[in-house]
Image (tube, rainbow, N blue to C red):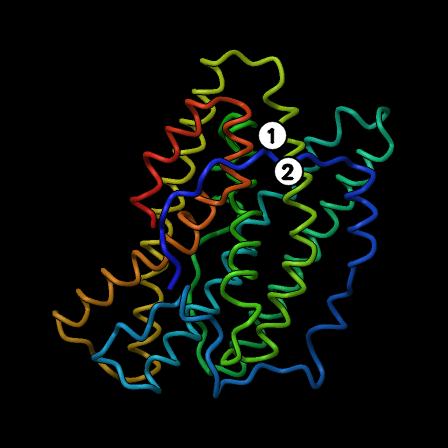
Amino acid sequence: MLTATMPTATKAPSYNYQDTLAASQRVNWRVEDIIGGDKTLDFTRPFLPEALARTTELKFLNQAERRIFNQIRGNAYLCIFGVVEEFILPFVLDHARPQLPGDDYRTRALLQFASEEAKHIHLFKCFKEEFTRGFGHECAVIGPPEAIAEAVLAHDPLSVAMAILQIEWMTQRHYLNSIQDDQEMDPQFKSLLKHHWMEEAQHAKLDTLMVEALAAGRSPEQIDQAVEGYLSIGAFVDGGLQQQLQFDLEAFEQVTGRKLTESERKQLIESQTQANRWTYLGSGMTHPNFLATIEKLSPAARKRIENVAPVFC
């Protein structure tokens, strides 16, 4: 299981639009090439690595029940990515629009970013349809995406860019630390995560550049305010995760026909609340590259985030 120790100081990464665009073009893939036809999910295997799912600690569930709950969590994992990308897409387009006549590489890289996010939304919708057919039960997911996007995008653009940067580095950490070498996961689900990671690796670079651009010329007080906005977005996400856990628990009981006891329900909620917090918040908030970028804006801002992060680890 991943630990929640705070990373040591890391030099802030430095990127440029031309190189990132070239990398994006090399790894580009089509939805049709990675899902559909004979590329189907294997429901005899778990979908998420144990470092994210944390189902083995649920001793009151048997092996089959833990696998089912893992698959429900896996469905939520990809569907939540789809929800998140519903606000990343308009944010990137809004960031690109004011400077269309400027740096051509910048414009092309940001439009490529937006195009890939639209493709990921399409991919996750295809996954949702296949999952529901194969699983035999439609599992609820937080939303609607438009309402979530409206709530997030109401914040300061720098706060939103920080939240997106956290998500991008979170994706990198999940794949490299937990998914890449996992031999138990369903190969098709793993393939979807791999292809998503390949393009998100470039998005993390572009969002670093967006954060730096949006922070340029701001006073320390304005940076601090943006960090508070970023933390407010995190609290909003945390509330959504608590609702998602209730959806997942309901789906589990309906699919298995098992009604958990009060004690079992309490244990599951405590365990999975922290699992979700680490998965969607802590693992990104404590990523060395994310913290290094924040520190470049303001050492006090990094310290503020590091003080809050243990709650989500």
Residue 284 pos. (x, y %):
47, 46
The amino acid beneath tag 2 is Asp
Q: Secondary structure at mark 1?
A: helix
Q: Quadrant of residue 285?
A: top left
Residue 194 pos. (x, y %):
63, 65
Image vertical order of residue 229 relative to residue 131, above or below: above
Residue 311 pos. (x, y %):
29, 44
Residue 165 pos. (x, y %):
56, 40
Residue depicted at 39% across the width and 67% down the height: 53
Q: Is residue 284 left or right of residue 197?
A: left
Residue depicted at 63% across the width and 69% down the height: 192
* Residue density around tag 1, few if under 14, some if 14–19, many if 20 or more, within 10 Å: many
Q: Is residue 91 visible?
A: no
Q: Is residue 83 left or right of residue 212?
A: left
The amino acid beneath tag 1 is Val
Q: Between residues 260 and 26, which one lies in front from this camera angle?
A: 26
**Disc number placed over residue 270 in the picture, else none:** none
Residue depicted at 37% across the width and 50% down the height: 240
Q: Which residue is mark 1?
A: 211
Q: Between residues 167 and 19, which one lies in front from this camera angle?
A: 19
* Residue density around tag 2, few if under 14, some if 14–19, many if 20 or more, within 10 Å: many
Residue depicted at 34% across the width and 79% down the height: 66
Distance between mark 2 and mark 1 Cα atoms: 6 Å
Callout 2 touching callout 1 (CB < 8 Å): yes
Q: Quadrant of the N terminus?
A: bottom left
Q: Which residue is mark 2?
A: 207
